[in-house]
Image (cartoon, grey):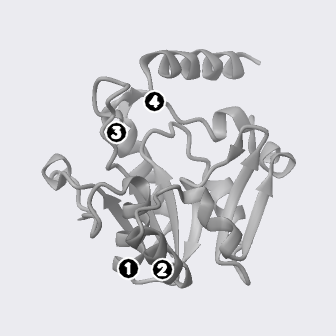
Amino acid sequence: MTGIVLAGGKSSRMGKNKAFLEFDGKPLIEKNLAILETLFSEVLISSNTPELYKSYQEKVVQDRYSGSGPFGGLHACLEESRTEYAFFVACDIPILDPALIQYMASLTEGYECVVPRTEDGMHPLFSFYNKSCLPKIEDFLKVGHFKVIDLFPFLSVRYVEEKELARFGDPRLLMCNVNTPEEWSGFQNRFMENVKK
């Protein structure tokens, strides 16, 4: 399997590149890459600004369809990857639990996607995808439809429900991604509250 960090967002609401937000003394992307390297035989970075990541050993893959958001990253990296399945995670997810990722990997057989689902909705940027998704992804990209969750009704999906996620910790923290300074501050406060429990 391949591990992929999606680092192509513009981070406009955050005001700075979310990949380089520091958590526990390290940039998020470094923490996430280090964890993926322990789990997967191949690790890629999805970004249209490869110069930002030239200091990392992982290959940077650029979108084939420009302006297509995360969907373009899914498409390009699935095409590029050497393995049948790939795990995608957004660079602005601060906590990667290796045990949860391994659990999700164990559910992939017979499914094209493995996707967490909580009361907040689906989490397509913390999910496994099979290369068999590529034709349908291309269909969406060709017509300019870039909403990833709209793909799922056309695929065989194993949803990982909140009660399953809860075995590995607080789903609100495990699935948390941050888009604004306020969300980043809120995440850090929730994390510290959890540590104190």
Residue 37 seen in the figure? no
Q: CA distance from mark 2 to mark 4?
A: 28 Å
The picture places residue 172, in percent across and down from the top left corner, at 70, 33
- From this view, report whether residue 76 is shown above or below residue 184: below
- From this view, report whether residue 183 is shown above or below residue 61: above
From the image, tell me which residue sits under label 2: 134
- Residue type pointed to by label 1: Glu
Check contact, mark 2 vs mark 1: CB within 8 A: yes
The picture places residue 92, in percent across and down from the top left corner, at 45, 38
From the image, tell me which residue sits under label 4: 179
Q: CA distance from mark 3 to mark 2?
A: 26 Å
Q: Label for residue 79?
A: 1
Check contact, mark 1 vs mark 4: CB within 8 A: no
At x 37% / y 62%, what residue is drawn?
A: 73
Which structural element holds mark 1?
Answer: helix
From the image, tell me which residue sits under label 3: 19
Local packing at callout 1 (Cα closer than 10 Å; few below 14, some 14-19, many 20+) is: some
Which structural element holds mark 4?
Answer: loop
**Between marks 2 and 1 in the image, the one whose residue lies nearer the viewer:** 2
